[in-house]
Image (cartoon, rainbow, N blue to C red):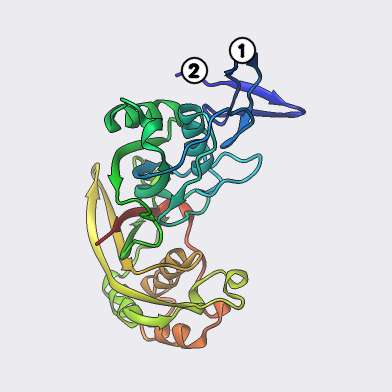
Amino acid sequence: MVDHVISFGAFPMFARGAFCSMLVRNGSSEREGALFVGAKLVESDREFVSDTTLAVTLGYRGEPFSGFARQPGQLTVQGELEGALALLFKREVETTCAGRTDAGVHARGQVVSFDVAREELGERSLGALQRSLDALTHDDIAVRAIEEKPFGFSARFDALAREYRYYFVPGAAKPLFLRDMCWHVPKGLDADAMRKGACYLIGEHDFKSFCLAASAVDKPTCRNVMELELFSETVLGEDALVMRIVGNAFLHSMVRTIAGTLALVGRGLREPSWVDEVLAAKDRRAAGENAPAGGLVFWRVMYP
């Protein structure tokens, strides 16, 4: 695919599928300049009644994107996907994701749902739709699968649990292949101490200490962490310490704050029991730093 460069006023964009122009047929004439930004398509002369819900499983490398959620003037995963859907269906297509990821966070199994009319699909198979979306979106997005779900299915509200994994690379040797996918901790980490600290976080708790303070104002902050473990894994010959966490849902920056808090324990700067004190404080200032975004991967979503 060739990247399109289109100037919108004084604002240039260099993102395949984010800004483009196309010919739209209107009666017997053709008009150029049906410009859409993200998923906002100016021209459409047909209306469809949605009766089909599709779910897309995506992977993406987070580094180029300003997060998942669409933002005006920013390259985002949702903006790329909705832009491609608008091209294919020639109208706005609103999507719902299983979990929003921040700028720089990667995904292996993000799930996104949207509604269409079966008439719009025509004779196009889901395999053909998958290939089209994969071709029309950014090179750092992989459309892994598309499947039909019961009408009204929501990638967000029908999810039972989400799994994230955070990759640390401890030790003096800097990572090469995992450089953009991990947090390098040169002085090493005590994995056993981190496991002891992690035990305090398993179960249903108020995780207010572990989320972005502004996002917790007047909002419920109780979540259920079903599983939390740390294990060693060798990836392309590089040794990583992986934090795997499964929960019903997560607060803004919750996983990265847990990773940053456990890293303090692993570096010997805090005792494992300190994690329990952080949890009880219900104050973001009590916890550790927000771990770098590049080490986090949205791994998968579990449904009934």
Relative depth, front residue between 275 and 145: 145
| Residue at 45 percent of width and 31 percent of height | 137
Q: Is residue 90 left or right of residue 151?
A: right
**Residue position marked by numbered label 1 in the rendering:** 30
- Vertical placement of residue 61 versus 133, above or below: below
Q: Position of residue 190 (x, y in %)?
A: 31, 70
Relative depth, front residue between 24 and 234: 24
Location of the C terminus (image quadrant): bottom left
Q: Are marks 1 and 2 in contact (CB under 8 Å)?
A: no
**Residue type indicated by callout 1:** Glu
| Residue at 56 percent of width and 81 percent of height | 283
Tag 2's secondary structure?
Answer: loop
Tag 1's secondary structure?
Answer: strand
**Residue type indicated by callout 2:** Val
Distance from disc 1 to disc 2, alpha carbons, whole Å, reads: 24 Å
Q: Position of residue 168 (x, y in %)?
A: 36, 57
Please identify the residue farthest to the right as the structure is shown: 10
Q: Position of residue 103 (x, y in %)?
A: 53, 50
Q: Is residue 33 left or right of residue 150?
A: right
Relative depth, front residue between 285 and 238: 285
Residue 204 position by quadrant? bottom left
Q: Residues within 10 Å of mark 2 (few under 14, many from 20)?
A: few
Location of the N terminus (image quadrant): top left
Relative depth, front residue between 131 and 201: 131
